[in-house]
Structures are given as structure tokens and as C-alpha cells.
Image: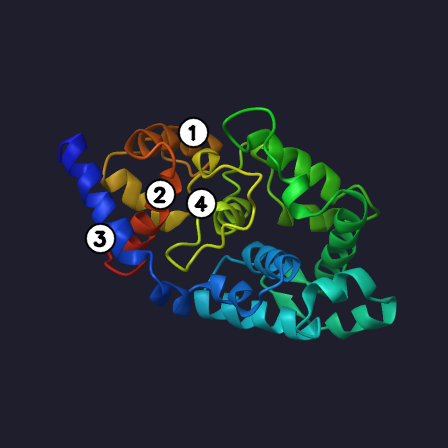
Amino acid sequence: MTKKELKEFLDEKAELYENIDFIDSDPIQIPHQFSIKEDIEIAAFLSAIIAWGNRKMIINNASRMIDLMGNSPFDFVMNHTEENLEKFDGFVHRTFNADDFKFFVKSLKNIYTNHGGLETVLQNKASDNYQLAIHNFKQVFFEIPHLPRTQKHISDPIKGSAAKRINMFLRWMVRDAKKGVDFGIWTTHNASDLHCPLDVHTGNIARKLKILKRKQNDWKAIQELDLTLRKFDKTDPVKYDFALFGLGVFEKF
């Protein structure tokens, strides 16, 4: 395909897959249960953080997390006691366990109490990409006492990680809600700065389409993919996440 044909192909696939039916099989359904901004943010963040592995298991475990928080995530974060956190004992999603979950709740309380909330802490102030913003977010997230093992659950692009789960969370929060999938509630952020959440599926499809040459799914691959997707749509490059993901998961392209 020529560049023009490829753009038209991906535009068509993005249009096809970005619709409310997408929600039924995706972890984004968890924050869609809420209407209050902070509830949406926290439910989305926790769902995104455990979004690796089997999608059904991700959705089930994210739903369980919200249930353990009394289905009021922001109220729970801000008003929980140590005794409340004991309910988490026994929770596990792959390598994310009850101790990690307890710390995440404590860290979120610190962020909302002392740093203006998730939208503020993840603001991209320095450039047209989120590499430094995600790095700085990790520093804030772990500024309170924590177990060293828990740090692995927040990726750091400065160290080369593609930070797939944080980039997916950012897409959910920042992109326009007009199609009914993403939320568009972070108006201080720009969709033009977002990065495609790069995983095995999207990476393999991008390579098949020859818009990504790098073999590793790391931050350098993100930067390479950005160059093409931002040429295709400079204001909303991450709409192509729906195209790449749909081609890989639904079409087995």
C-alpha cells in the first residue's frame, strides 16, 4: 500500500472499531460504570494498571477491585482506614497482589490530597510527548513509604519502557468522548500528544503494515510509531490504536 492507501485503510478500521460495542469486551467498561470525574479516573487507573494477560480475567479482577472499594472508588481512597484495607487480603492479579493494591490506594490518597489529583500529576508540561510526564508521575506515586516490589507496576519511559498501561489510561482520559468509548474529561491535556498503547498485538500489526521497524516494544518503538501516526492525524494520532488493536485481536490480521 502507498502511504495514502495505508492512511485510508487505518482511518476506515479506526472508524469501524471505535464504537460503544468495543466497551463490552474491554477493561474500559469498568470506569464506564461511573459519572463522577474522580470515580472515573480511579476506576480507569486501577483497571489499566492490571491490564495485561487474558482480557476476561482483567475485567473480572478490575471489577473485583472496585467491589472491594465499596463501588465508590474516590470516597474509599479519601476515607479508607487500615481496617478497610484488610478486605484486600487474598486479592491477586498475576503479580499484582493485595500489598500492591493497598499501597496504590494510599498513594492515590496522597496524590488527590497533596498534588491536585491524577490529571494534574500526569500533565505534560515540557514537550509534545509524555515521556518525562510519566517518569515524574512515578516519582510522585512512590514518594510515600512503599515496598520495593510495588514499583514494577508503574513503568518508566526514561528507562526505555513503552509504558503501555499508562498510555492506555491517558488515552481513556484525554481523547474526545464523541464516539462513546474514551472519556475526554482531562481538558488540560492534548490528544495530539498521546502515544499509542504499544503491546504485542499493536506492535505486530504495525510491523506487518511497515509503519514500525523496531523489533522491541519499547519507548524507541513508541517514538518511531508516533512519527507516522502523527502524520496521518496530527490532532488525534491515537485513534489508530483502535485500528491496530482491532486488526490484531478481532481480525487476526
Q: Which residue is mark 2?
A: 203
Q: Which residue is mark 4?
A: 197
Residue type at tag 1? Gln
Sequence-earlier tag: 3 or 4: 4
Q: Position of residue 118 (x, y in %)?
A: 66, 47
Sequence-earlier tag: 2 or 4: 4
**Callout 1–callout 2 Cβ contact below 8 Å:** no
Residue type at tag 3? Phe
The residue at 37%/38% (across/down) is 237
Measured Cα–Cα span from mark 1 to mark 2: 12 Å
Can residue 89 be seen here? The reply is: no
Q: Position of residue 171 (x, y in %)?
A: 48, 47
Q: SS class of the residue under badge 2?
A: helix
Measured Cα–Cα span from mark 3 to mark 2: 12 Å
Q: On the image, which quarter does residue 102 sit in?
A: bottom right
The numbered dot on residue 223 is 1
Which residue is most to the top?
A: 126
Sequence-earlier tag: 1 or 2: 2
Residue type at tag 4? Pro
Measured Cα–Cα span from mark 3 to mark 4: 18 Å
Q: SS class of the residue under badge 3?
A: loop
Q: On the image, which quarter does residue 35 sit in?
A: bottom right
Measured Cα–Cα span from mark 1 to mark 4: 12 Å
Q: Is residue 192 left or right of residue 3?
A: right
